[in-house]
Amino acid sequence: MDTNPSQHGARAVSRLTARQRQVLALVAEGRTNAEIGEALGIGFETAKMHVGDILARLGVDSREDAARLWRSQQTAGARLRRALGILPAVPARAAGFAVGLGAVAVAAAVVFALLRSDNRAEVPPAAPVATQTTAPSVELIGTRWDLVTIDGQQAVSYESAAYLLLRDEPWEDGFHGGGYSGCNGFGGEYSVEGRRIRFGGMFQHARGCGGLADNVEEPFISALHSGPLVLEQSGDRLALVTAQGMRLEFVARTDGDPARTLTLHRWALTNLDGRGEGAFRSIVFDFKANGKFSTTTACGELRGGYEHAGMEMRIVVDGETPANCAEPDKVFDAQLRAALSRTTTYLVDLTVLSLLDAEQGGVGLAIVEP
């Protein structure tokens, strides 16, 4: 049991990775997740997940608490204690007078350097931006990996590319990962040990697509469930190989993460609970980075808020359908509000956004061209 909060804080911070310390230093400066992502060259969602993992590892409930803990470890006194703690012990009798003077000189130099540092935080240097050569440097975690081939055969899907997205977000006994099978969204737990990756229990939508989709979905999901897979990555190429030798090959999509795509564009309604009409496209959604959204139906403005993590999404719609709205428009407005409120999952693929619920209803949208 830790009886000294200072010692506890030092141990907690020491357990953070170099990247997490970079993120925490920026949190202590008051940076937002978007600003952290821009400063470190990572996506907004990746920055957000780093912050969540840091709070969990430090055992604190808020960014402010984490920032206070970080700052408490960056005082001259705290750095002095750490620095002196790594100086070699000098036996009093064996060292002799000269060695004793040397130890004192080293300690004095450490103190002098620390006191001249003006309390500046010990921040690990930011990772340099990789120079693109024949293949770009791509992080395994946080990158969307599009499925290209299954055992050498091209993976042609029903609507859009099947993909895998691994996130640095704690989930059950591992981390959260998911993607799109070519027909249905899926997600669940994964863990990486060395060059092997294992997927645990997954949830998956149950829409039937048939044809090309079955040729991709069944072997893709079965391979992920088959046990530990050998993981091979070279630049923007990734391969997962099952114990039976089945090989899934992926290529990195480097055009932004789904959360950023969600807020970069305006989205026109294309279908509601499986029903599509041309008139729907006049209803355009605008998702803001601050967690708010808005659109306009024939009954007037519809606003609300949203939260998302991984593939999960929750939408809260403000207010109710106006009572003075014409009956057909009133019914449609109420149906749209209900479908949005049921949302549990979101999928972004190229120009298509799907807001889905557990019963496979939901809202389909497409990017509004500029």
Image (spheres, helix red, strand yellow):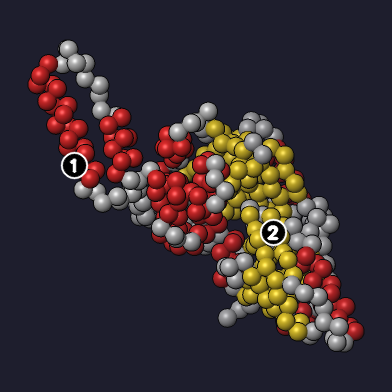
Left or right: residue 164 versus residue 18 is right
User: Which residue is tagged 2?
Assistant: 313
Q: Amino acid at mark 2?
A: Met
Rendered residue at 31%/29% (across/down): 85
Left or right: residue 219 versus residue 251 is right
Secondary structure under the numbered disc 1 in the rendered image: helix
Left or right: residue 210 versus residue 117 is right
Question: Is any part of residue 361 visible from this angle?
Answer: yes
Locate residue 269: give its quadrant. Answer: bottom right
Q: Please identify the residue farthest to the left as the structure is shown.
A: 98
How many angstroms separate mark 1 from mark 2 (CA)? 52 Å
Asked whether the beta carbons under mark 1 and mark 2 sit within 8 Å of each other, the answer is no
Q: Amino acid at mark 1?
A: Phe
Left or right: residue 100 versus residue 3 is left
Q: Residues within 10 Å of mark 1 (few under 14, many from 20)?
A: few
Residue 77 x/y as whole percent: 31, 41
Give the number of marks: 2
Residue 214 x/y as whole percent: 77, 50
Q: Earlier in the sequence, mark 1 or mark 2?
A: 1
Rendered residue at 88%/78% (across/down): 331
Rendered residue at 28%/35% (across/down): 83
Pick the front one: 284 or 241: 284
Q: Residues within 10 Å of mark 2 (few under 14, many from 20)?
A: some
Pick the front one: 333 or 250: 333
Secondary structure under the numbered disc 2 in the rendered image: strand
Q: Quadrant of the C terminus?
A: bottom right
Per the rendering, the mark at residue 112 is 1
In the figure, 269 relative to 347: above or below? below
